[in-house]
Image: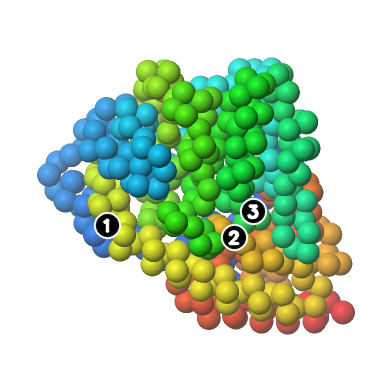
């Protein structure tokens, strides 16, 4: 096996989850998904497709109906995007990996903004790239970007910048002005941008279009920009493995070939479910966002009231990211919370070394009382450590 693969670090989130999966007494908030099932109208679309016998291959870039639906959906949020720039993928993670495979050669330099979901720094490493990171900085529990530090890190040697905003795990979000500044700088250095914007609709600040600022709002179709999206979060479809990429026209032919050599295509019945999700999105996504905001507003004040906790309300995403003073080993604490308190959280150092001592709590819970009980368990455990 290639050394780059052997050198990959196993998921610390999975390590914690493996310690508690199967235990009925554990409140699990470690994975980034809601505990709500996919809406019935979406599931029924897949069932109807299977009943029609749609079990064959599709176009590499996706069903024309789905590409048109995605283009219309995205164009309602951002400047017009043509369906010819949409590539349907087998999940958001597949979209991100395809983008990295398309853009990164062995030996290339990649810059990533961290803390971040670990796949985003692992993927270029798999390709043999050198990954440099620019760390967000916490201020009173809220993570912020040093824009000058990021621009200094991106040079003509930098092939690709990877940025996830709204961010998993911190909830940090770029402003439109910051996106313009980053894009202008990358134009000057010839650097590609891979923007992971899967949480754009899970945004809690008031905006005219109901979503977070996007690089699509400030870029031209020919900019060196690839934007990755997923049906997982906004449409409650994590297990369906359906996503998409918005690409410059020059990349489309090559992306079709790349999808062929990876997965060939997303399954047709899953794509039919995607069409239904977009068609009924006005009934699904606003409800999801309102519920997530309510969950955030239950959890964060309770956490903030716990002595020794540093936390700020996330502007976007589905996570409370908090520091537990006096507990410097996130992985050890997360494992102990599972075994000793029945509370399942993700360790901060799974996302970056600078997040050591932090914990991620996914607040996407159908019943907010689970969050209240989780904080009670955390408080009880902390009281027993004195």
- Whether 125 is drawn above or below 11: the answer is above
Of label 1 and label 2, which has the lower sequence position? Answer: 1
Residue 77 picture location, percent across and down: 40, 48
The answer to whether the residue labelled 2 contacts the one labelled 3, judged by CB atoms less than 8 Å apart, is yes
In the picture, the disc for residue 315 is 2
In the picture, the disc for residue 172 is 3
Q: Is residue 148 visible?
A: yes
Residue found at x 73% / y 36%:
150
236 to the left or right of 214? left
Query: Marks 2 and 3, Cα distance to the nearest angstrom?
Result: 7 Å
315 to the left or right of 248? right
In the picture, the disc for residue 280 is 1
* Circle nearer the viewer, 1 or 2: 2
Residue found at x 14% / y 48%:
51
Query: Marks 1 and 2, Cα distance to the nearest angstrom?
Result: 25 Å
Q: In terms of secondary structure, where does tag 2 sit?
A: loop
In this rendered view, identify the residue nearer to me: 135 or 271: 135
In the picture, the disc for residue 128 is none
Of label 1 and label 3, which has the lower sequence position? Answer: 3
Q: Is residue 334 visible?
A: no
Counting labels gives: 3
Residue found at x 62% / y 56%:
171
339 to the left or right of 250? right
- Whether 327 is drawn above or below 352: the answer is below
In this rendered view, identify the residue nearer to me: 66 or 191: 191
């Amino acid at each position: 096996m290639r050394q780059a693969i052997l050198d990959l670090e196993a998921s610390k989130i999975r390590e914690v989850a493996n310690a508690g999966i199967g235990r009925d007494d554990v409140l699990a908030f470690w994975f980034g998904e809601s505990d709500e099932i996919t809406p019935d109208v979406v599931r029924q679309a897949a069932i109807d497709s299977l009943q029609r016998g749609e079990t064959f291959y599709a176009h590499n870039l996706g069903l024309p109906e789905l590409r048109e639906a995605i283009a219309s959906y995205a164009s309602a949020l951002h400047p017009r995007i043509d369906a010819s720039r949409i590539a349907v993928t087998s999940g958001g993670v597949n979209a991100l990996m395809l983008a990295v495979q398309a853009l990164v050669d062995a030996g290339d330099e990649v810059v990533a903004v961290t803390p971040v979901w670990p796949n985003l720094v692992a993927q270029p490493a798999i390709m043999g790239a050198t990954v440099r990171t620019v760390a967000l900085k916490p201020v009173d529990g809220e993570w912020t970007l040093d824009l000058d530090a990021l621009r200094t890190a991106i040079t003509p040697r930098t092939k690709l910048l990877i940025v996830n905003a709204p961010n998993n795990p911190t909830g940090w979000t770029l402003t439109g002005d910051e996106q313009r500044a980053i894009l202008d700088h990358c134009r000057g250095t010839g650097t590609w941008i891979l923007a992971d914007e899967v949480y754009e609709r899970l945004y809690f600040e008031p905006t005219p279009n109901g979503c977070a600022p996007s690089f699509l709002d400030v870029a031209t179709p020919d900019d060196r920009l690839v934007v990755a999206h997923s049906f997982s979060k906004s449409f409650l479809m994590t297990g369906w493995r359906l996503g998409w990429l918005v690409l410059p026209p020059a990349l489309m032919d090559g992306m079709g070939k790349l999808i062929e050599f990876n997965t060939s295509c997303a399954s047709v019945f899953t794509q039919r479910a995607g069409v239904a999700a977009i068609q009924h999105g006005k009934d699904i996504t606003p409800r999801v966002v309102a519920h997530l905001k309510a969950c955030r507003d239950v959890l964060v004040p309770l956490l903030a009231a716990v002595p020794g906790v540093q936390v700020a309300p996330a502007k976007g995403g589905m996570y409370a990211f908090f520091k537990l003073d006096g507990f410097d080993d996130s992985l050890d604490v997360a494992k102990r919370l599972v075994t000793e308190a029945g509370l399942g959280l993700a360790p901060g150092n799974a996302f970056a070394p600078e997040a050591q001592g932090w914990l991620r709590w996914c607040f996407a819970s159908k019943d907010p009382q689970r969050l209240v009980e989780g904080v009670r368990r955390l408080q009880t455990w902390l009281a027993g450590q004195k």
